[in-house]
Amino acid sequence: KAGVTQTPRYLIKTRGQQVTLSCSPISGHRSVSWYQQTPGQGLQFLFEYFSETQRNKGNFPGRFSGRQFSNSRSEMNVSTLELGDSALYLCASSSFGDSYNEQFFGPGTRLTVL
Amino acid sequence: AQSVTQPDIHITVSEGASLELRCNYSYGATPYLFWYVQSPGQGLQLLLKYFSGDTLVQGIKGFEAEFKRSQSSFNLRKPSVHWSDAAEYFCAVGAGGSSNTGKLIFGQGTTLQVKP
């Protein structure tokens, strides 16, 4: 079974631009979660999607948004980029998103904002 | 609120020595606990998980962890470390509850360095 894939792997943007990141979950998994990883804040939960609906959201500004398609693929978008948005963005898939479902992570997208 | 603490930011061990990485959690009910490993520039790989039952759980790559409710701990161990184990290790707890779907709460991570 193929793992979680994320595209692109690396992105360089400038302040004020917007960016879209993509995540393809493991086949059959319906829950996709997104995390931001930075050296200062560690791994922080952004949001979770299940069956095209956002079920849970972390404490991030509205500039961070996402969506999920009928095939469970998910995208996240960051608008009006700030320097502090530079981070590794990880997506993870699980079967149903319940707390006892292990999450399988993709390799991440490294976003650099200049 | 749930939280996870990994007291050791950085640990160095000699190859072949034993390893123990500490993890303490704060959670009201029975926690769902996980250990992940991250190599530089990579995503997270699940090492093992605890949901219920036997408090000693075995994982991949020769790792094991013991759940101790009285100490709110879930420490990761390995009897003999290999150079390839050098990486960052994260302890995590499932946030729990119907309003916390898909959310893992992570500790700050422990970086393991292995001396030859």
Image: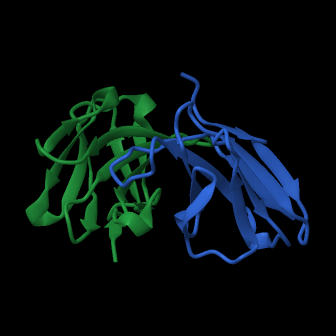
Chain colours: A blue, B green
Q: Is residue A84 left or right of residue B31?
A: right
- Image x and y of residue A72, in percent: 63, 42
Viewer-closest of B82 and A90: A90
Relative to A45, say whether A108 is above or below: above
- Image x and y of residue A106, in percent: 60, 40
Q: Which corner quadrant of the image does residue A64 belong to?
A: bottom right
Identify which residue is drawn at 22% across, 54% down.
B74
Relative to B29, say whether B39 is above or below: above
- Image x and y of residue A16, in percent: 90, 72
Relative to A83, say whether B81 is above or below: above
Q: Which corner quadrant of the image does residue A9 belong to?
A: top right
Identify which residue is drawn at 21% across, 33% down.
B79
Q: How many marks?
A: 0
- Image x and y of residue B45, in percent: 46, 38
Identify which residue is drawn at 83% across, 69% down.
A79
Q: Which corner quadrant of the image does residue A41 belong to?
A: bottom right
Indicate the quadrant containing the N terminus of chain B: top left, top right, bottom left or bottom right.
bottom left
Viewer-closest of A93 and B3: A93
Viewer-closest of A55 and B89: A55
Q: Is residue B103 left or right of residue A69?
A: left
Identify which residue is drawn at 57% across, 42% down.
B43
Indicate the quadrant containing the C terminus of chain B: top left, top right, bottom left or bottom right.
top left
- Determine if residue A90 is in view: yes
Viewer-closest of B112 and A27: A27
- Determine if residue A36 is in view: no
